[in-house]
Image (cartoon, rainbow, N blue to C red):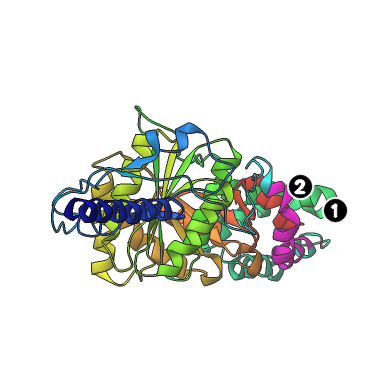
Amino acid sequence: MEFVLIAIAILVVGLVLGISLLVGRGRRTTRLDDDATPGTTLTRPRPPAPTERQRPSGSTASGLGLPPDTAEVDGATAPPVDLPPAEPEPGLLFETPPPSAGRLVRLRSRLARSQSSLGRGLLTVLAREKLTEDDWEEVEETLLAADVGVAATTQIVDRLRTQSMVLATASGPQLRELLVRELTAVLGPDLDRSLGTDRREGRPGVVLVVGVNGAGKTTTVGKIARVLVGDGKSVVLGAADTFRAAAADQLETWGERVGVLTVRGREGGDPASVAFEAVRTGVEAEVDTVVVDTAGRLHTKGGLMDELGKIKRVVEKQAPVTEVLLVLDATTGQNGVVQARVFTAAVEVTGVVLTKLDGTAKGGIVVSVQRELGIPVKLIGLGEGADDLAPFEPEAFAEAIVG
């Protein structure tokens, strides 16, 4: 009788364990053992599934294996955990983004609407029969009001002055062409605006996205993922903004819509740990690019700025950071230049993303940032739509400003 009872007990335990395993495999997200690491999570993308290069071999995730100074490790390293395929969430549609080429041209009308006062003001003055000193002062005021900056304004006015004889008899189309040419010249047409997103020496390109609170970093990271997927690249996203659970959720949704993996951590965890794991995952999956979102921070807070340096150092234990993008809100005007200086000192910014350009008439901030800091504007945001982020093209931008 005792043997029968023991057999029944073993059978019951086996059934309970089997049901638990089946329930676990149906979950959308698998979280690593919290006792092993700071609770990093790998979120599987929604079907249609990405290519094999986008996911780790065998769909597995091991313990973080972080260096001692990057995470608090409490207990032994967890064994490899199998990540089952994600189940599609009802109502979430997989999207195929358009390529980045030609995006700014398609969005030019939106930019022209916000910058129309600048273009109209300049053309109105230049079309006058005889330009007086007051007219030139009006040109200067128009450019300065658009945040073009003193040095660039002086350059534009001086160059236009030398051609005043031509302007006196020029037709409308000729004036427009001349103004577009001069604006393009101060926008830095020769600057390298390519994004460091390609694989190098067998490792993925790593893009670190930084900026102050409210500039639109998380949304920008999601849009960058769409740009890269649209251009045929495989991507992993790192949700290293661990201070806002909503930021990780938002980034996860962006990733799911284009079928890319998102690595996230528990709320309040070490952001450097999440960034490290995201890049490690990208290395193992042999993806083209890893894009890491960081928490917003005021440029006046020294401790938070130092944390950015730590994130960069930790990430580079896995792969070199190939691009550091600073997200600036174009509506902040010249204060954006001040922010850029501080962030550049902390993490050596390689490119600027200007957001909300469709909501300001001060598009000249593009010129100010580039001339004063020597950092090219590489991407601009022209709306709240998913594909309203475009590579910056100086001539197309000047054309839109003039209208």
Q: Is residue 148 magenta?
A: no
Boundaries of the magenta span: 104-123
Residue 114 is at least partly visible in this image: yes
Residue 231, compared with residue 272, is above or below; it is: above
Q: Is residue 117 magenta?
A: yes
Where is mark 2, residue-wise?
177
**Exactly how many numbered labels are in the figure?**
2
* Residue type at tag 2: Glu
* Mark closest to the chain's N terminus, 2 or 1: 1
* Residue type at tag 1: Gly
Residue 170 is at least partly visible in this image: no
**Left or right of 309 in this view: 403:** right
Please name the residue shown 58% across and 61% down the image.
364
Closer to the camera in the image, 30 or 117 = 30
Q: Secondary structure at mark 2?
A: helix
Please name the residue shown 49% across and 54% down the image.
221
Where is the C terminus found, in terms of image quarters? bottom right
In the rendered image, which quarter is residue 89 located in?
bottom right
**Left or right of 2 in this view: 176:** right
Residue furthest top as drawn: 201
Closer to the camera in the image, 183 or 247 = 247
Where is mark 1, residue-wise?
172
Specify the principal SS of the magenta part: helix
Q: Residues within 10 Å of mark 2 (few under 14, many from 20)?
A: few
The numbered disc on residue 206 is: none
Residue 270: image x %, image y %?
A: 26, 61
Residue 161: image x %, image y %?
A: 67, 55
Q: How far is the residue under mark 2 from the one under mark 1? A: 9 Å
Residue 323: image x %, image y %?
A: 40, 45
Residue 340: image x %, image y %?
A: 40, 61
Q: Secondary structure at mark 1?
A: helix
**Left or right of 139 in this view: 151:** left
